[in-house]
Image (spheres, rainbow, N blue to C red):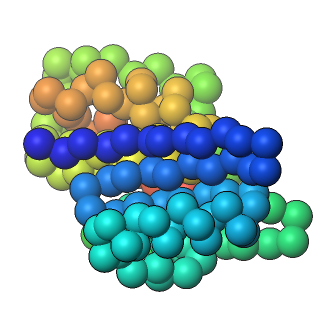
Amino acid sequence: MTLACVYTLNRKDGEMAICVYVDDLIIGCNNDKLRNIIVGLIRDKYGIKDQGQLDFVLGVEIIHRKDGILLSQEAYIDRLLERHNMQDCNPASTPLSPSLNLTRDPDGVSVDETLYRSIIGGLAYCMYSTRPDIAFSVSKLSRYLNDPKKSHLIAAKEVIRDLKST
């Protein structure tokens, strides 16, 4: 069983959030002195090691900038493209054409369910992490996880091609 928890501390001298995922902690604080005190207490009690500034977590790259942070899944998307032999594909300008009418297509050519589910799972992870713009497309394509047809696979690959372009 996996437990994920977020703990917060709000004080006059600062605010802190500690995200716990299995045996990893992500600590954010707007006051360095408060952060050092709390991290010191945790280190003394549990023997943690401070790995410094967060730069990568669960397939998401954290890019620190002067005006804030940027979350990127470029490396994950590159691996998704490679996994499905699409690294050299032409990019698409939209995730899924709004006029595309997907149906159960009982007479269509069946495709490998495992392949289709793998693509939809990869797209869903992107959607939940950094790409809410593909939510409609992923939702629509998820309707066909059982008995996907060639038309569904083509549409799913169109979403991957959109990820490549952006």
- Where the C terminus falls, by quadrant? bottom right
Residue name at image x 23 percent, y 50 percent: 118
At 61% across and 71% down in the image, what residue appears?
Answer: 36
| Front-lying residue, 68 or 142 | 68
Asked whether, in this view, residue 65 is left or right of residue 105, the answer is right
Query: So how many labels did they put on this image?
Result: 0
Residue 164 in view: no
Residue at x-position 32% and y-position 35%: 152
**Residue 146 lies in quadrant:** top left
Determine the image quadrant of residue 38: bottom right
Relative image position of residue 52 (x, y in whole percent)? 55, 81
- Where is the N terminus found, in terms of image quarters? top left
Vertical arrangement, residue 39 with respect to residue 50, above or below:
above
Query: Does 83 sit above or below residue 113?
Result: below
Judged left or right of residue 106, residue 142 is right
Q: Is residue 21 visible?
A: yes
Q: Position of residue 142 (x, y in %)?
A: 32, 29
Q: Position of residue 4 (x, y in %)?
A: 32, 43
Q: Nearer the viewer, residue 116 or 47?
A: 47
Residue at 42% from the left image edge and 26% from the top image edge: 139
Q: Measured from the top left, where is residue 63 in percent x and y?
A: 67, 72
* Residue sitting farthest toward the right: 67
124 and 31: which is toward the camera: 31
